[in-house]
Structure formats: C-alpha cells, structure tokens
Image: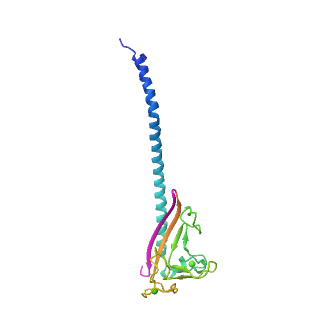
Amino acid sequence: MFTNLSQGPSSKAARGMTLIEVIVALPIVLVALGMFLQMLTAGIGVRATSGETWAVSCAAQDVLERMRNTPFRELFRQYNADPMDDVGGAATGPGNVFAVGNMEPIDSDDDGFVGEVILPFANVGTQLAPIWHVREDHANEELGTPRDLNADSLVDAFDHSNNYSILPVLVRVRWQGRWGPRTFTLSTVLSEER
Ligand SMILES: [Ca+2]
Ligand SMILES: [Ca+2]
C-alpha cells in the first residue's frame, strides 16, 4: 500500500514554506538582477568608451602621420589657422582643426571641431585680420616653448616661419564622451631630418 503524501497536512506546510521562501527570496533576486543589469550596462559603457578612445587615437595618429608626410617647409602654411595662405590655394590645406567621425565637441569649444593641431604659431595681427608667425617666444608649457626653433641657440621674438628647423606639435582631441568631456593628446617634435 502506498500513501499519497502530497495530500497530507505536511505537504501543505511544505507548499506554505515554499511560498514564504519565494517571498523572502524575491527581493534578493531583484537586487541580484539589478546588480547584473548594472554590470551589463557598465560593461557596455566601458566598451563604448574604449571604442571612442580607439577612434580618437587613430584620428590623432593619422593627423601626425599626414604632418610627417607634408614637406617640412610647408607645415606652417598648411597647419596654421589662416586658410588664405594654404599651399594649394585658399582653404585647400588641412588647417589647424579637424573632425573625428560624428563626435560632438565639448560645450566650451568655440570652433566646433573636436580636433586641434597646436603649434608655436602666434597671431600678431588682429582677430579680423590675422597675421600668423612662427614664434620662439610663444609660451606653451605643453609644447615646451619658449624654445629655439631655428637652431641658432637663441630664443627671440622674431617671425621664424621661413627658417624654423624644428616644430613642436600637439594633436589634441576634446570631445563630449559617453560619461562627460574627454581629452586625448599626442605630442612630438617635427624636424627637417625626418
Ligand atoms: Ca594656412
Ligand atoms: Ca632661435
């Protein structure tokens, strides 16, 4: 003879306990699920951030590579902020700013481009009528200037756009990242002996 235990009072108690267990476990499960979703979201965020950095790094290195492939004497005219003196005619040069895909510039960015090429160039004219010079006395700690740029062992306040022999350069990208403003910078010194 077999007894159907499922119909007994102990089975009802077991079912009751199971229900209580579920009620007790539910918040724990929900918390665990929340943590899992948080980790999943963070993981996606990390991947997106890494993707941004990779794209920006490639773009900055590409700009530096193009500068290395530009005739050294033409770097000043091609990468200053004056489109009128570009070697191939007005506004044919790359200029001092560049875009990276559809990345958004940070709010305080005046020119609307995320990328910027920074060289020891100074505007000795006005905003409306700029006159760009290569200046040894251009003060920029990141560029390492003031610095002798024409190898005469002197640092002066003259225009060296026709006789510079080295050009320190920063290629900087500032963009509105997934988690806020971000900056990536490459720096090097370009010289005639490349
Ligand atoms: Ca130019
Ligand atoms: Ca000098």
Q: Which residues are magenta?
A: 178-194
- Residue 153: x and y, percent? 42, 87
Q: Is most of the magenta stretch helix, strand or loop?
A: strand
- Residue 133: x and y, percent? 54, 82
Q: Residue at x 57, y 82 (%)?
A: 124
- Residue 167: x and y, percent? 46, 79
Q: Residue furthest left?
A: 1
Q: Is residue 193 magenta?
A: yes
Q: In this rendering, is residue 169 above or below 149? A: above
The image quadrant that residue 78 belongs to is bottom right
Q: Is residue 48 magenta?
A: no
Front position in the image: 156 or 93: 156
- Residue 45: x and y, percent? 48, 53
Q: Residue at x 55, y 71 (%)?
A: 97
Q: In this rendering, is residue 167 above or below 180? A: below
Front position in the image: 62 or 176: 176
Q: In this rendering, is residue 185 above or below 32? A: below
Q: Is residue 88 left or right of residue 8?
A: right
